[in-house]
Image: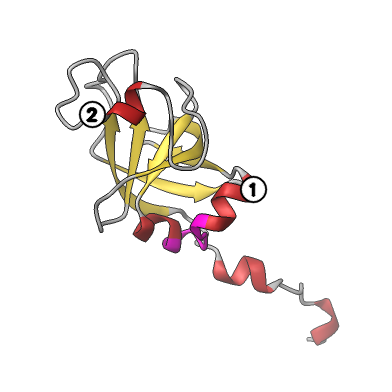
């Protein structure tokens, strides 16, 4: 077999997870959130303004797993796909930072806590 028939894979594709990164899925910003802070209540994220149905906060470990840094998030406004058990996918923009050290995606939910969402999901960076 000739090596010229093989597809070339870019370094970017080699460093990205292909099936997604499994992260804990949590929610914040809902009425009665016991960990709410004044900036969240004003709609201010660490990187950008928060928007219902669009914003997600990621931990630093989650950013690293996706190959992102804080400055890159501030400059590029990246979006992620959050693949739920059962086949559904949420599209969210990284607008905020979650404080824990584990890999976690924290959904901004000012309209209320959604008990139907699973505890874990696979997160991929949209390119």
For residue 15, the mark is: none
In this rendering, is residue 32 above or below 121?
Answer: above
**In the rendering, at what x and y percent does residue 1 appear?**
78, 86
Residue bearing the label numbered 2: 36
Q: Does 116 appear above or below 24?
A: above
**What is the residue that sits farthest to the left in this orientation?**
34
**Residue sitting at the far front:** 38
Q: Is residue 2 above or below residue 52?
A: below
Quarter where residue 56 is shown: top left
Report how far apart the C-alphas of labels 2 and 1 lie in the structure.
26 Å
Is label 1 in a helix, a strand or a loop?
Answer: helix
Residue 77 position, x and y percent, is 60, 42
On the picture, is 69 further left or further right than 25?
Answer: right
Q: Outermost residue toward the right?
A: 4
Residue drawn at (25%, 22%) of the image: 116
Q: Is residue 59 above or below residue 8?
A: above
The residue at 34%/52% (across/down) is 59
> Is residue 125 left or right of 42 when viewed as pictured?
right
Give me the residue at 63% from left, 66% from top.
Answer: 13
Q: Mark 2–mark 1 contact, CB under 8 Å?
A: no
Q: Report if residue 65 lies within the magenta region.
A: yes
Q: x, y (%) of residue 96?
A: 42, 40
Look at the image and give the residue range highlighted in magenta: 64-70
Label 1: few (<14), some or many (≥20) within 10 Å?
A: few
Residue 62 horizontal/vertical position (percent): 38, 55
In-front residue for pair 26/82: 26
**Which mark sits nearer the N-terminus, 2 or 1?**
2
Q: Disc 1 designates what residue?
A: 76
Callout 2 secondary element: loop
Say left or right for 79 vs 84: right
Which of the two residues, 24 or 37, is positioned nearer the viewer here?
37
Q: Quadrant of residue 78?
A: top right
């Amino acid at each position: 077999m000739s090596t010229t028939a093989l597809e070339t894979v870019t370094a970017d594709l080699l460093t990205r997870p292909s099936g997604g990164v499994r992260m804990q899925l949590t929610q914040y910003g809902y009425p009665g959130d016991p960990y709410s802070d004044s900036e969240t209540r004003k709609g201010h994220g660490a990187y950008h303004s928060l928007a219902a149905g669009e914003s997600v906060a990621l931990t630093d470990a989650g950013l690293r797993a996706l190959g992102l840094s804080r400055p890159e998030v501030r400059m590029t406004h990246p979006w992620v796909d959050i693949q739920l058990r059962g086949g559904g996918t949420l599209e969210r923009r990284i607008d905020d930072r979650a404080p824990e050290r584990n890999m976690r995606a924290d959904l901004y939910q000012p309209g209320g806590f959604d008990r139907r969402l699973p505890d874990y999901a696979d997160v991929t960076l949209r390119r």
